[in-house]
Image: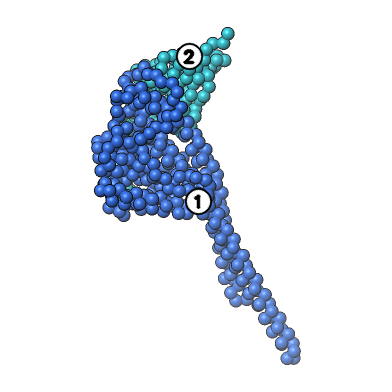
Chain colours: A cyan, B blue
Amino acid sequence: MQAPTIHVDIVSAEGEIFSGPATMVFAPASQGELGITPRHAPLLSLLKAGEVRVQTPDGEQHFFFVGGGALEVQPTKVTVLADTALRARDIDEAAALAAKQRAEEALRDKAGHITQAEALAELARAAAQLKLLERLRKLRG
Amino acid sequence: MPGTKEIRSKIASVKSTQKITKAMQMVATSKMRRAQERMRLARPYAQKMRNVIGHLTEANPDYRHPFLVRREPRAVGLIVISTDRGLAGALNANVFKQTLLLMREWQGKGAQVSLCLIGTKGLTFFRRLSVPILANVSHLGDRPHVKDLIGTVKVMLDAYRAGELDRLLLVNAQFVNTMTQKPAVEQLLPIEALDIEGLQEHWDYIYEPEAAYILDGLLMRYLESQVYRGAVENVASEMAARMVAMKAASDNAGKLINELQLIYNKARQAAITKELSEIVGGAAAV
C-alpha cells in the first residue's frame, strides 16, 4: 500500500518554486521547526529564514531555502508562501527610512543604512544556507 | 554634381538611426516576453495569499484589521509607477494624465493627496507640483524585485496605519496586449473585497503565534505583492510601448530613406543629362 501523501505548494511573489505530493514536510516556523505529515490539523504560521524540506513519495528529499514567509496547512495541502527577501522589523524600518529620504532629497546616496539588525539577519540567512549546504553534502556522501 | 553629396550623407545618417531604432525594437520585444513571463509567475502567489487571507478573515469575523476597515477619505495616497527611461511612446504621459485627473477629483472632494513615486520619470514630473511626495524608489531595472519595493510600500502602509492616509491607490500602466497599454487605477487600502470564490470548506486554524499577528504579516505581504505585480506589469507595458514606438520610428526612417533616394536619383539623372547636352552642344558648335 502506498503511504498517504499531502500536496505541497511552495510559491514566492516572483515565481512558483515547487508543487507536488509529499509524505512529509519540514518548515522553520517562527516558534521552532515543524514537521507536517498528511492529515495534519489546519495550521497557520509565519516562517523565519531557514530550510523547507520536502520528502516525496519516491523517497527523495528536496531542500528549499526560504528567507521567511508564511505557512498554511490544510489536511490535504501545505502552502508555503515564501519571501524572496530578508525580512525583519528593523530592516523594513531602515528600508522605509531610505525610501523617505530618497523622496526628500531626490538625488542623494542612500548609503549608511546598513544597521546592526541588517547585518544580523544577513548572518542568520548565511548560516541557514550553510547548514543546508552541509546537509546536502552529507546526503551526497 | 551639386547637392548629391549632401543627400548621400543625409541618407547615411538616417540609415544609422534606423539601425539603432531597429535594435531597440528587437531588445524591447525580447524583454517584453520575459516581463510577461514574470507577470504570469507572480499570479499563483497572489491567488494563494488571497485564499489564506480569505480563510483567516472568515474564521475570525470579530477581529477587524485596520487594513480592512473603511474610513472617511480625508487623505488619499497614490502610488504611481512609471518607467525609468523614455522612448516609450505616450506610456508615461498617459499614466501621469490619469494621476492628475485622480488628484483633481480627490482634491475636489476636499481630500488631501500625497504621492509615492516608483520610477525616475514620475519623480521628474511630479516634483514640479506642490504635492507632498512621501516616498520614492527608482532604477528598479527590467527585473524589479520585491525587496526593493518593501521600504517604499511600508512608508505608505505606516502612514495608513497612523491615520495620515485613509485610502491608498495604485496607478500603473496596465498591459492589455502588445498594442494597447492603458493606465489603470486600483484600490490597495482599505482592502474591499477579497476574491474568495474558491472557498467551499470552512475551518479554523491552529495559530502560531496568534491570529492578529499572522494576519498583519499576511496582509503586508499581500499588498507588497500587489505593488510588485504593478511594477512588473509596468515593465511589460514599457517594453511593449517601446517596441511599437521603435517599430514606427524604423518604418518612418525607411520611408525617409526611400524619398531621399528618389531625390538623389533625380539629381544625379539631371546632372548627367545636363553634362550630355553640354557635350552635344559643344560638338555642334565646332
Amino acid type shown at disc 2: Pro
Q: Check the image and name the residue furthest to the top.
A: A1
| Residue found 27% across the figure and 43% down from its top | B75
Could you tell me which residue is drawn at 58 percent across and 70 percent down? B7
Residue at label 2? A38
Q: Is residue B132 left or right of residue A139?
A: left
Mark 2 residue element: loop
Which residue corresponds to the image point at 45% horizontal and 54% vertical from the top-left?
Answer: B90
Crowding around mark 2 (Cα neighbors within 10 Å: few <14, some 14 to 19, many 20+) is many
Q: Which mark is residue B242?
A: 1
Chain assignment, label 1: B
| Above-or-below relation of B92 to A49 | below
Answer with the quarter of the image where residue A117 lies. top left
Give how far across and how far down residue B160 sits, in percent.
Answer: 28, 37
Residue type at numbered disc 1: Arg
Which percent across, then down, holds residue B285? Answer: 73, 91
> Does B130 sit above or below residue B5?
above
Depicted B253 relative to depicted B164: above or below: below
Please indicate, yes or no, whether residue B133 appears anywhere in the rendered image.
Answer: no
Q: Where is residue B199, by image quadrant?
A: top left
Q: Are marks 2 and 1 in contact (CB under 8 Å)?
A: no
Give the mark count.
Answer: 2
* Image vertical order of residue A134 relative to residue A11, above or below: above
